[in-house]
Amino acid sequence: MFEPLVWSAIIIAFAALICALDGSRDVFHPLVFIAPMLAFIYGWMPMKLIASDGLARFFDNDQLVLVQSLNVAGILAFVLGCLAVGARVGRQRRNPAKLSPLACLRLRIGGAIAGGIGLTCWLITIINVGGFVKAFSSSYSGGWDDSGYIRDGGLLLLVGVMLMVAAIASEGPRVANLLLLALFGVPWLTQALLTARRGPTFALVIVVMMSWYMFRGSRPPVVATAALGLGLGWLVLFLVANRGSIYIGSDFDVKTDVTTTVSGSDTGNEFVYGAGSIISTQRRGHYFWMRRYLAQILVRPIPSAIWATKYEDFGVPELLHNAGTGEGFADALGWEGAVGSAPGIVADLFIEVSWGTVFLMGVLGCAYGWVWKKTVTGTVGWISQYVIISALSIYLVMQTMEAVIFRTLLLSIPCWLVWNWAMRAQSQEIDESETSFSDGDLFGSGSVHRA
C-alpha cells in the first residue's frame, strides 16, 4: 500500500504541473515550480529509499502508510487550492509596465538603501570571524554575529537585487543600476556557493530570473525553463552532496552523482526525519496549535539580549531544537533525529495542527495562486511579492514554516514600502492616457495601462 501512495504523490504533482501550464500558459505559475519539489520530497525521495531498503530500519509498513496518506492528502489540497483561484487568467497578453523616470529613480534609491543595509550586515558578520578567507575556509561556515538582526539583515541584499533588476527591466542597463546589482548580488552569490547552501542559491536564481522576465512582461520558453529548472535542481543537490568539499583551501574533490543526497538512509534525510516527526507527534498527542508560528511573529523580533528566555516564557522552548520538530523521537521511535534537520512542510504543519494540515495546505495553495493572479492582472507592485514567495518556496517545501515566516516579512515589507513610494511618483508624473494609479495605492484598485 505504501508504494502506490508514493506513486500517487508523483502523479498528482505532475498532473498539477501540466494542468497549471496548460491552463495559464505561464511558466511562472506556482505549480510549475512547486509541484516538482513536492514530487521530489514525497515521491522520488521515498522511491530511492525503497530501492535501497533504507526505510525498514526506521518504520513499519503501517507507519509508512499513515505518513504517506497524510503527504498525499496535503499535496492534493495544495494543488486544488492553487488551481481553485483560477489558472486561465494567465492567458492574457502580457506587456511591460512603463515606469516613469522618477519611479525608477525611487526604485534605485530604495533598492540602494535596502541592499546597502544588507551589505553592511553581511560585512559585519564576515569581519567578526576574521575576514573573508577565514569565513569561508571551512565547510558550511560563513560569517557570524551574536545579534539576530545582523545575521538576518543580510537577506536585504535580495531586496536590493530585486529592485535593481526591476529598474533595469524598465529603463535599461544604466551603469548605476548594474553596479548596484553587482554590489548586492556578488556577496549573496559568494555566500551561497562557498557555504554550499541550497536555499540561498535557489533564492538568488529565482529572484534574478523571475524579476527580469516579469517586470518586462514576458516569459522564457517552456523548453528553456525546463532546462533551467533541471539544472537548478541538480545544482542544489550538488551543493548538498559536496558540502564537505566546498570551501576556500579545499582540494574540491567533488562528486557529480547527487543521488546519494536522496537515497542516504540516515536520520537527517528529509523524508525519514519528516516521517519520524509525524509518528512521534501522533504517539505523544502533543501539538503546538499555532504557537510556534506566532512565536516567529510576536517573540522572535525581540532581541535575546533583552529577553533571554523569550521562547520558554512563550511556551515553546522546543523551538531551540530543530524548530520544535525533533521532540520525543527516542521515546516514540527508539532513535533520534539528526540535529539541524528539517521535516518538510506537511510534517511541520502536522506538528502544529494534526490533520488540520490538509486544510492549511489548501490555504497555502490558495495563497500562492492568489498572489500569482495579482501579478498577471495588471497590478505591477505585486510582482515583487510574488517573486519573494517564489524564491522562498524551497524553504516552504523542504524545511518548515518557521524558515519562511520571518524571511517573508523581512523581504516583503521593504519591497512594499519602496514600491508604494515609487508608484506615488508614477501617478504624479505619467500622463493619464499612458499609465494611471488610484491614489498611488500599490495594492488597491489602481491599474497599470500597459505601454
Image (cartoon, rainbow, N blue to C red):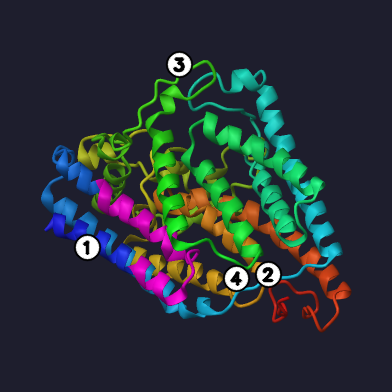
Distance from Cα at disc 4 to Cα at disc 1? 31 Å
Residue annotated with mark 4: 375
Q: How far across and how far down the image is residue 84, in percent?
A: 42, 78
* Amino acid bearing label 1: Ser
For disc 3, the marked residue is 251
Say which amino acid is labelled 4: Thr
Tell me the mark number nearer the camera, choosing from 2 and 3.
Answer: 2
Q: Secondary structure at mark 4?
A: helix
Q: Secondary structure at mark 1?
A: helix
CA separation in Å, label 1 and label 3: 43 Å
Q: Is residue 309 above or below residue 14?
A: above
Q: Is residue 248 left or right of residue 322?
A: right
Q: Earlier in the sequence, mark 4 or mark 2?
A: 2
Q: Which residue is mark 1?
A: 8
Q: Please tell me whether mark 4 or mark 2 is closer to you in this view.
A: 2
Residue 96 is labelled as: 2
The earlier-in-sequence mark between 2 and 1 is 1
Q: Earlier in the sequence, mark 3 or mark 4?
A: 3
Marks 2/3: CA–CA distance: 47 Å
Q: Which segment did they paint magenta?
A: 16-45
Of callouts 4 and 1, the N-terminal one: 1
Residue 255 in percent (x, y) is at 35, 28
Mark 2 crowd level (few <14, some 14–19, many ≥20, 10 Å Cα): some
State if disc 3 and disc 1 touch (CB < 8 Å): no
Which residue is at the front of the view, 227 or 325?
Answer: 227
How far is mark 2 from mark 1, CA to CA? 40 Å
Which one is in front in this view, the residue at disc 3 or the one at disc 4? 3
**Corner quadrant of residue 297:** bottom right
Rendered location of residue 56, percent (x, y):
13, 41
The C terminus, quarter of image: bottom right
Q: In x, y percent, where is residue 176?
A: 81, 46
